[in-house]
Amino acid sequence: MAAKPKLWYFRGRGRMESIRWLLAAAGVEFEEEFLETREQYEKLQKDGCLLFGQVPLVEIDGMMLTQTRAILSYLAAKYNLYGKDLKDTVRINMYADGTLDLMMMIVQAAFKPPEEKEENIAFIVTKAKTRYFPVFEKILKDHGEDFLVGNAFSWADIQLLEAILMVEELSASVLSDFPLLKAFKTRISSIPTIEKFLQPGSQRKPPPDSHYIQVVRHVLQF
C-alpha cells in the first residue's frame, strides 16, 4: 500500500489549504507535520527539502515537492481532476490561478497592521464582487452546465468553492447578486468527499488567529 502524502506547513491555512482541499476532494488521506519552531524549518532547509527555502512542502510518490501551483497541478493530474485534454487543462489552470490570486489577497491580509484590516476586507470583497465572481457567474451561465470545465468535476470547481467560502467569511451576503454561484456552492458542497471535509473535526483549518500569525512570523523571521 502506498504511503499517505505528508504535508509540512503551519497549523493554519496559508498556501497549504488549497492542497488540503484538493487531496480531501480526491478522497485521499494525508498526514501533516506542523511547523512550530525555527529549528524545524532550518532542518528542512539543511536536509535540502526546500527548493527555494519555502513551504508548503509535500512528500508524495517518493518526491519532496515545493511551490504551491506545481503541487496543485501534480495532484490534479494524478487524481483525474485536470480535464480530458489540453484545452480543458489550460482552462482549469486559468480559473484556478484566478481563484488562487483572490485567496492569496485574503491570506496576506491577515499579516497587515490591525488598523488596515477593515479597509483591506472591504477592498477584497469589492474585488471578489467586481473582478472575480462575475467571471464565474458568466461561465456557468454561458455553458449551462454543473461544473466549470467540460461538465466534469475538476480542480477548478474545488478551488472556486474554497474561494467562495473564504470570501463569505468576510461578507456573508457576497453571493447575493450571483444566483448561479449560489447554486454552484450548494452543488459542489454536497459532493460526498467535500461534504466530509466541511464537517467539524476534518483537516480543514480555521481562519488565521493571532497565535497562527505569531508562529509564522517566528518561524520565518519576518
Image (cartoon, grey):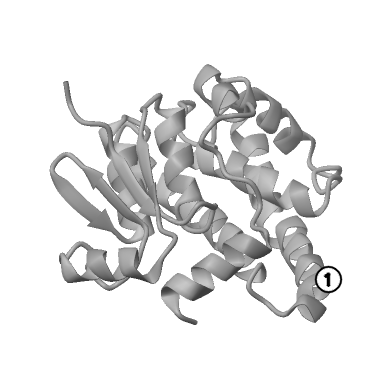
Asked whether 127 or 193 is in front, the reply is: 193
Is residue 46 among what the camera can see? yes
65 horizontally vs 185: left or right: left
Q: Residue at x 43, y 74 (%)?
A: 220
Amino acid type at image mark 1 = Glu
* Residue projecting furthest to the left: 62
Are there few (<14), some (14-19), or many (20+) residues within 10 Å of tag 1?
few
Q: Quadrant of the N terminus?
A: top left
Residue 120 pos. (x, y %): 75, 72
How many numbered markers are drawn? 1
Percent x, y of residue 32: 38, 43
Vertical comparison of 172 with 53: above or below: above
Residue at (32%, 30%) from the top-left corner?
Answer: 80
Left or right: 128, with 211 as reference point: right
The residue positioned farthest toward the top in the image shown? 192
Nearest to the observer: residue 151 or residue 108 = 108
Residue to which mark 1 is pinned:
118
Q: With respect to residue 135, does 202 lie above or below?
A: above
Vertical placement of 44 versus 31: above or below?
below
* Secondary structure category for the residue under label 1: helix
Residue 45 horizontal/vertical position (percent): 23, 70
Q: Is residue 98 left or right of residue 38?
A: right
76 with respect to 195 (left or right): left
Q: Quadrant of residue 43?
A: bottom left
Residue toward you, 16 or 94: 16
**Residue located at (37% from left, 56% from top):** 69
